[in-house]
Image (cartoon, rainbow, N blue to C red):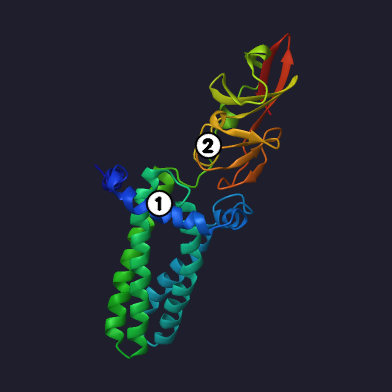
Amino acid sequence: MNLSTPLDRVAGWSALDAIARPIRKAIQSVLPTGLADVLHGRPLGHALHPTLVELPVGAWTSAALLDLVPGQRRAADLLIAVGCAGALPAVVTGWADWSALRPEQQRVGLIHAAGNVTAVGLYAASLVARLRGNRRRGKLLAAVAYGAAGTAAFVGGHLAYRQAAGVNHAAAVDALAPSEWTSVALLTDLPEGRPVAAQAGQLAVVLYRDGSQVHALADRCAHLAGPLHEGTVSDGAVTCPWHGSRFDLATGALRQGPATAAQPALDARVRDGRVEVRRG
């Protein structure tokens, strides 16, 4: 047993879905696709949320240190205010990412969010106490808030490193894809206009036939490893059935999030009636 064990148990608490479900629907109903892609970090190529978290965490850490230094009252107060202001965009991007996670990740994400909300509330109360001249109370509230923020950060780390939320689930494709041409299917076995699952050595791939031409992508979506062969195809792109990420069938280029990375495309050819693929 380690510190992550209780969070592993939280991931199995389906009762939390009653809380998560309406929040997820509300978030998705107010976020247009273009704005959602920006909040997810598509222009950066990876999640935006961890970058924005640096401001409030840095400000609050500096304030905690300055609270121990005589004559730094104003600087500490300013940093707490900056941290509270900087928490807003971090919260917005965090909720956007959370709304596109799997249920077990969302359950742990609720704990992460609760810790951060508690921290921001305590820091706001600390700032009010400081402005009213009650510095002892202000420092005490800030200390408790810093503990809450640290706990929330630990839970966030669990989400990223234990539950693989926000990471590129297609990162291992280069290591798994065959470097030599590998037969994966008969052309006659591939229906036109419908994605089909196949296996290229150790790598699951999705094939799409368009006449005599065949496109091949890694099958597991870069966002959360959704099965692309179960998705729909339109306008030359395949849509992941789990969270709606869209990838160009020919190049794997990302057309729509919540994924932030492109989907690895494989070279494909037809030889003697057989479809062959290799690492692109």
Secondary structure under tag 1 reads: helix
**Numbered circles on residues, count:** 2
Assess disc 2: are there few (<14), some (14-19) or many (≥20) residues with their C-alpha within 10 Å of its C-alpha.
some
Q: Residue flagged by tag 2: what amino acid is it?
A: Pro
**169 is higher (above) or lower (below) than 199:** below
- Decide if residue 47 is on the left or right side of residue 135: right
On the image, the x and y values in percent for residue 102 come to 42, 43
State the residue at coordinates (74%, 21%). Answer: 211
State the residue at coordinates (42%, 45%). Answer: 161
The residues bearing labels 1 and 2 have C-alpha atoms spaced at a distance of 27 Å
Marker disc for residue 241: 2
Which residue occupies the extreme right position in the image? 212
Marker disc for residue 157: 1
Which picture quadrant has residue 229?
top right
Secondary structure under tag 2 reads: loop
Q: Residue flagged by tag 1: what amino acid is it?
A: Gly
**Contact (Cβ within 8 Å) of mark 1 with mark 2:** no
Which picture quadrant has residue 180?
top right
On the image, the x and y values in percent for residue 98 come to 45, 52
On the image, the x and y values in percent for residue 109 come to 38, 52
On the image, the x and y values in percent for residue 261 come to 60, 44
